[in-house]
Amino acid sequence: MAVNTTADWSDPATCPYCGDDLESAGAGFVDHVDDNDPCKREFDHWRNNIAGDLAGEWGG
Ligand SMILES: [Zn+2]
């Protein structure tokens, strides 16, 4: 699964929320948010926002 990035996330090797280095881009980020609750909350919040934006167009 590809992880879509936020608009201002310019470095995929770094967590956009806390700035920590990630072991690898994409999969490393998923592992990172699993281990870091504050980052996980931010990521979930962002993902829910995306889902909400798309719901109107993808409804049904
Ligand atoms: Zn982080």
Image (cartoon, rainbow, N blue to C red):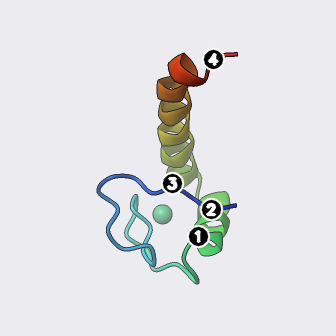
Q: Residue at x 64, y 63 (%)?
A: 30
Q: Earlier in the sequence, mark 2 or mark 4?
A: 2
**Given the image, on which type of amino acid does mark 2 rest?**
Ala
- Circle 2: is it few (<14), some (14-19), or many (20+) Cα within 10 Å? few
Mark 1 to mark 4: distance in Å?
27 Å
Q: Earlier in the sequence, mark 3 or mark 2?
A: 2
Could you tell me residue 51's position as x and y percent? 56, 31
Q: Residue at x 53, y 21 (%)?
A: 57
Tell me the element at label 1: loop
Ligand 1 closer than 8 Å to label 3 CB = yes
Quadrant holding the N terminus: bottom right
Tell me the element at label 2: loop
Q: Which mark is residue 2?
A: 2
**Given the image, on which type of amino acid does mark 3 rest?**
Cys
Q: Which residue is mark 3?
A: 39
**Given the image, on which type of amino acid does mark 1 rest?**
Gly
Tell me the element at label 3: helix
Q: Which residue is mark 1?
A: 26
**Given the image, on which type of amino acid does mark 4 rest?**
Gly
* Marks 2 & 1, CB-CB < 8 Å contact: yes
The residue nearer to you, when weighing 22 against 1, is: 1
Asked if 42 appears above or below 9 in the picture, the reply is above
Q: Residue at x 61, y 74 (%)?
A: 28
3 or 1: mark nearer the eye: 1
